[in-house]
Amino acid sequence: MPKKIKDISELPGVGRSTAAKLTEAGYSTLEAIAVASPQELSTAVGIPLATAQRIIRAAREALDLRLKTALELKRERASVRKITTSSKNLDALLGGGVETRTITEFFGEYGTGKTQLCHQLSVNVQLPPEKGGLSGKAVYVDSEGTFRWERIESMARALGLDPDEVMANIFYVRAVNSDHQMAIVDELFELVPKENIKLIVIDSVTGHFRAEYIGREHLAQRQQKLNKHLHQLMRLAEIYNVAVVVTNQVMARPDVFYGDPTRAVGGHVLYHAPGVRVQLRRSRGNRRIARVVDAPHLPEGETIFVITEEGIRDPAE
C-alpha cells in the first residue's frame, strides 16, 4: 500500500528547494496546491509548466479530488456533520442543524437575528457531538463591527461553559475592506487544519463589496470579485469539512407590488453559491421567522425561533 502523502515535501518531484519556493509563494499545503492552476503555480514558483501540472495532479490524488461515482458521493455525505442552532425548530428546518461542507447564508433586514445566530453557532461548535457541536473552534470575520464578546459570554454561561475558554476558541478578525476579507480567507487554508477549526463565519459577506463598487458601471467587477470570494469559501468548506456561515443584507425592490419587496444583496452570483439560503424576518417581540428559500436537499418551509438573553431558543408554548 503506497504511503499517504501528508506534506508538500512528500509530493513526487518536490525537493527541499521547490518545497521552500512553494511555501514562500503561499502554497504551503496540499489543498493550496490542489486548487491552483498550472499557469499560476508555474509563474509564482518559477518551475516549468509540465512540472507544475505534475505537482498539482499529485496533490489532488493525495486529497482524493478525482472523478467519483454517485455511490461514493453518497458515502461521503456520511462525513457531513451538523451544528445545532440551540433552537429545535430551526434545527429541524435546516435538516438537523448547520451543515459542514457547505455555505449557509442567513439574509434579512437589520435586527432579524443574523449576527445573533453567528454568535450562537460560534459557541455551539465547541460543544461535544452528543450535544450538537463538533468539539471545534470558530473563526469570526467581522466586516461591519457587529461582534460582541458580551453575547458570547452570556451564551456560553447559559450552556454551562466557561466563557473565557469559549472566547479563547473563537478567532476574531475585523475585515477592513473586500481585499482584506479575501486575504483573510486565503490564510484560513493554512490555519483551519492547524487549529481544529470547524466553523467559519463571515458577517456580512457582501458589505464591503457593496460599499466599494457603487453604480452600474462597477457591477460586473463587483460580481466577479464576489464570485471569486464565494468560491474560496466553497473550497474551504469542502476540502476541510467545515461549516461556512455567511450573513447578507437585503435591499428593496421598487418594482415589486405584491409579496416580499426585499431581496438579498449580491444578485445571481450569491443565489447560486450557498448550499442553503435562509431568509430571516421579524415577528412579534423577540420572535423571528426563518424560511428556507433555496437548498437542494431541503424542502421549502418556515419556522419560528426567539432571541433571548441566553441566546437562540424555541418560543415558549
Image (cartoon, rainbow, N blue to C red):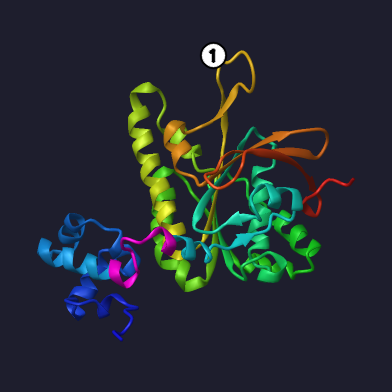
Circle 1: element type: loop
Q: Is residue 59 above or below residue 184?
A: below
User: From the viewer's perspective, is 284 left or right of 11?
Assistant: right
What is the x, y in percent for residue 260? 63, 23
User: Start and end of the magenta stretch?
Assistant: 60-72
How many numbered markers are drawn?
1
Which kind of residue does numbered mark 1 sit on?
A: Asp
Is residue 5 inside the magenta stretch?
no
Question: Could you tell me if residue 211 is visible in this image?
Answer: no
Q: Say which residue appears at 20% left-offset and 80% top-offset.
A: 16
Residue located beneath label 1 in the image = 255
Q: In which quarter of the image is the N terminus?
A: bottom left
* Of 94 and 148, the residue lying toward us: 94
Is residue 69 inside the magenta stretch?
yes
User: From the viewer's perspective, is 227 left or right of 142?
Assistant: left
User: From the viewer's perspective, is 165 left or right of 191?
Assistant: right
What is the x, y in percent for residue 43? 15, 58
